[in-house]
Amino acid sequence: METNDPFVILGLPARFDLREADVRAAWLRRSAALHPDRADANAGMDEAERARAAAVLNDAKRTLEDPERRADALLLRLGGATKEQDKSIPPEVLMEMMEARETLEQAASAGDAAALDGSRAWAEERRAGHIERVGDLFARAGDPPDAAALRAVRAELNAWRYVERMLEQIDAPPASG
Protein backbone atom coordinates (compact mmCIF):
# COMPACT_ATOMS: atom_id res chain seq x y z
CA MET A 1 0.00 0.00 0.00
CA GLU A 2 1.61 3.16 -1.25
CA THR A 3 -0.68 5.69 0.46
CA ASN A 4 -1.31 6.74 4.03
CA ASP A 5 -4.81 8.05 3.19
CA PRO A 6 -7.18 5.96 5.36
CA PHE A 7 -10.09 6.53 2.96
CA VAL A 8 -8.10 5.08 0.05
CA ILE A 9 -6.66 2.26 2.17
CA LEU A 10 -10.14 1.06 3.15
CA GLY A 11 -11.79 1.96 -0.16
CA LEU A 12 -14.29 4.32 1.45
CA PRO A 13 -15.59 7.67 0.22
CA ALA A 14 -13.77 10.66 1.66
CA ARG A 15 -16.51 12.13 3.85
CA PHE A 16 -16.92 12.95 7.50
CA ASP A 17 -20.30 11.27 7.93
CA LEU A 18 -19.10 7.67 7.64
CA ARG A 19 -20.90 5.06 9.70
CA GLU A 20 -18.77 2.93 12.02
CA ALA A 21 -20.42 -0.21 10.58
CA ASP A 22 -19.28 0.78 7.06
CA VAL A 23 -15.73 1.37 8.27
CA ARG A 24 -15.69 -2.03 9.97
CA ALA A 25 -17.14 -3.80 6.90
CA ALA A 26 -14.52 -2.22 4.63
CA TRP A 27 -11.76 -3.16 7.06
CA LEU A 28 -13.02 -6.76 7.24
CA ARG A 29 -13.09 -7.02 3.42
CA ARG A 30 -9.56 -5.70 3.08
CA SER A 31 -8.29 -7.78 6.01
CA ALA A 32 -9.80 -10.96 4.58
CA ALA A 33 -7.91 -10.33 1.35
CA LEU A 34 -4.64 -10.51 3.33
CA HIS A 35 -5.40 -13.91 4.82
CA PRO A 36 -2.69 -16.46 3.93
CA ASP A 37 -5.31 -18.80 2.43
CA ARG A 38 -6.16 -16.13 -0.17
CA ALA A 39 -3.13 -16.79 -2.34
CA ASP A 40 -4.76 -15.05 -5.31
CA ALA A 41 -5.00 -11.77 -3.41
CA ASN A 42 -1.54 -11.82 -1.92
CA ALA A 43 0.57 -13.44 -4.56
CA GLY A 44 4.18 -12.58 -3.92
CA MET A 45 3.57 -11.29 -0.38
CA ASP A 46 5.53 -12.88 2.40
CA GLU A 47 4.41 -13.04 6.02
CA ALA A 48 6.22 -9.82 6.97
CA GLU A 49 4.62 -7.91 4.08
CA ARG A 50 1.18 -9.19 5.05
CA ALA A 51 1.82 -8.12 8.66
CA ARG A 52 2.82 -4.62 7.51
CA ALA A 53 -0.25 -4.39 5.27
CA ALA A 54 -2.45 -5.54 8.16
CA ALA A 55 -0.93 -2.86 10.42
CA VAL A 56 -1.70 -0.21 7.79
CA LEU A 57 -5.30 -1.47 7.55
CA ASN A 58 -5.67 -1.45 11.34
CA ASP A 59 -4.38 2.10 11.58
CA ALA A 60 -6.75 3.25 8.82
CA LYS A 61 -9.65 1.60 10.67
CA ARG A 62 -8.71 3.30 13.97
CA THR A 63 -8.44 6.65 12.19
CA LEU A 64 -11.82 6.42 10.48
CA GLU A 65 -13.64 5.03 13.53
CA ASP A 66 -12.58 8.02 15.62
CA PRO A 67 -14.55 11.14 14.57
CA GLU A 68 -11.77 13.56 15.49
CA ARG A 69 -9.06 11.60 13.68
CA ARG A 70 -11.40 11.07 10.70
CA ALA A 71 -12.08 14.82 10.49
CA ASP A 72 -8.37 15.56 10.66
CA ALA A 73 -7.60 13.02 7.91
CA LEU A 74 -10.37 14.44 5.71
CA LEU A 75 -9.21 18.00 6.26
CA LEU A 76 -5.64 17.09 5.26
CA ARG A 77 -6.91 15.22 2.20
CA LEU A 78 -8.85 18.33 1.15
CA GLY A 79 -5.74 20.48 1.45
CA GLY A 80 -6.36 21.99 4.87
CA ALA A 81 -3.65 22.87 7.36
CA THR A 82 -2.33 20.50 9.99
CA LYS A 83 -2.76 21.37 13.66
CA GLU A 84 0.95 22.26 13.71
CA GLN A 85 0.54 24.68 10.80
CA ASP A 86 -2.59 26.42 12.14
CA LYS A 87 -3.13 26.61 15.88
CA SER A 88 -6.00 29.10 15.68
CA ILE A 89 -8.80 28.84 18.19
CA PRO A 90 -11.56 31.35 18.88
CA PRO A 91 -10.65 33.48 21.95
CA GLU A 92 -14.00 32.77 23.63
CA VAL A 93 -13.34 29.02 23.38
CA LEU A 94 -9.92 29.46 24.95
CA MET A 95 -11.46 31.40 27.84
CA GLU A 96 -14.21 28.81 28.30
CA MET A 97 -11.63 26.00 28.36
CA MET A 98 -9.46 27.81 30.91
CA GLU A 99 -12.47 28.15 33.22
CA ALA A 100 -13.48 24.52 32.68
CA ARG A 101 -9.95 23.30 33.43
CA GLU A 102 -9.84 25.37 36.60
CA THR A 103 -13.13 23.78 37.72
CA LEU A 104 -11.75 20.35 36.86
CA GLU A 105 -8.51 20.92 38.77
CA GLN A 106 -10.43 22.09 41.84
CA ALA A 107 -12.70 19.03 41.68
CA ALA A 108 -9.74 16.68 41.25
CA SER A 109 -7.73 18.18 44.10
CA ALA A 110 -10.79 18.05 46.39
CA GLY A 111 -11.59 14.48 45.32
CA ASP A 112 -15.10 15.66 44.44
CA ALA A 113 -16.53 12.79 42.34
CA ALA A 114 -19.78 14.63 41.60
CA ALA A 115 -17.90 17.69 40.31
CA LEU A 116 -15.65 15.43 38.21
CA ASP A 117 -18.76 13.79 36.75
CA GLY A 118 -20.10 17.27 36.01
CA SER A 119 -16.87 18.20 34.22
CA ARG A 120 -17.04 14.97 32.20
CA ALA A 121 -20.67 15.65 31.23
CA TRP A 122 -19.77 19.22 30.24
CA ALA A 123 -16.85 18.01 28.08
CA GLU A 124 -18.90 15.23 26.46
CA GLU A 125 -21.59 17.77 25.58
CA ARG A 126 -18.93 20.02 24.03
CA ARG A 127 -17.52 17.03 22.11
CA ALA A 128 -20.96 16.31 20.64
CA GLY A 129 -21.26 19.95 19.62
CA HIS A 130 -17.87 19.88 17.90
CA ILE A 131 -18.78 16.69 16.02
CA GLU A 132 -21.98 18.31 14.80
CA ARG A 133 -20.29 21.59 13.82
CA VAL A 134 -17.44 19.83 12.00
CA GLY A 135 -19.97 17.74 10.09
CA ASP A 136 -21.89 20.88 9.13
CA LEU A 137 -18.70 22.69 8.09
CA PHE A 138 -17.61 19.80 5.86
CA ALA A 139 -21.11 19.55 4.37
CA ARG A 140 -21.11 23.26 3.49
CA ALA A 141 -17.45 23.46 2.41
CA GLY A 142 -18.16 23.07 -1.29
CA ASP A 143 -16.46 20.95 -3.91
CA PRO A 144 -13.70 21.85 -4.08
CA PRO A 145 -13.73 23.45 -0.64
CA ASP A 146 -12.56 27.03 -0.38
CA ALA A 147 -9.70 28.09 1.87
CA ALA A 148 -11.99 29.87 4.36
CA ALA A 149 -14.05 26.70 4.84
CA LEU A 150 -10.92 24.66 5.47
CA ARG A 151 -9.66 27.24 7.99
CA ALA A 152 -13.03 27.11 9.78
CA VAL A 153 -12.80 23.31 10.03
CA ARG A 154 -9.22 23.55 11.39
CA ALA A 155 -10.25 26.10 14.04
CA GLU A 156 -13.15 23.86 15.11
CA LEU A 157 -10.84 20.83 15.25
CA ASN A 158 -8.34 22.78 17.35
CA ALA A 159 -11.10 23.70 19.81
CA TRP A 160 -12.31 20.08 19.82
CA ARG A 161 -8.77 18.92 20.68
CA TYR A 162 -8.89 20.99 23.89
CA VAL A 163 -12.06 19.15 24.92
CA GLU A 164 -10.48 15.78 24.12
CA ARG A 165 -7.44 16.63 26.25
CA MET A 166 -9.75 17.54 29.11
CA LEU A 167 -11.58 14.20 28.80
CA GLU A 168 -8.22 12.39 28.75
CA GLN A 169 -7.26 14.22 31.95
CA ILE A 170 -10.58 13.31 33.61
CA ASP A 171 -10.23 9.66 32.63
CA ALA A 172 -6.54 9.35 33.53
CA PRO A 173 -5.83 7.33 36.65
CA PRO A 174 -4.89 9.51 39.61
CA ALA A 175 -1.16 10.00 40.07
CA SER A 176 0.21 8.06 42.99
CA GLY A 177 2.30 10.02 45.38
Image: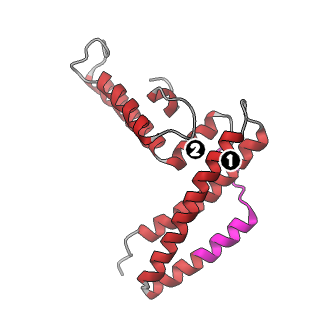
- Crowdedness near tag 1: few (<14), some (14–19) or many (≥20) residues, C-alpha within 10 Å: many
Name the quarter where the C terminus is drawn: bottom left
Label for residue 153? 1
Residue located at (44% from left, 85% from top) = 112
Task: Find residue 25 and name its label.
Answer: none
Can you give x and y, in whole percent of width and height, for residue 119 in the image?
Answer: 51, 74
Image quarter for residue 162? bottom right
* Amino acid type, callout 1: Val
Mark 1, secondary structure of its residue: helix
Q: Name the residue beneath numbered marker 2.
A: 71
Is residue 108 in view from this perspective?
A: no
Residue type at the position of mark 2: Ala
Q: Is residue 127 above or below residue 84?
A: below
Q: Residues within 10 Å of mark 2 (few under 14, many from 20)?
A: many
Q: Residue at x 72, y 55 (%)?
A: 88
- Element marked by disc 2: helix
Q: Is residue 93 magenta?
A: yes
Quadrant in which the N terminus is drawn:
top left
The magenta stretch spans which residues? 82-100
Is residue 101 in view from this perspective?
A: yes
- Tell me whether the residue at label 2 lies in contact with that at label 1, contact meaning CB atoms closer than 8 angstroms: yes
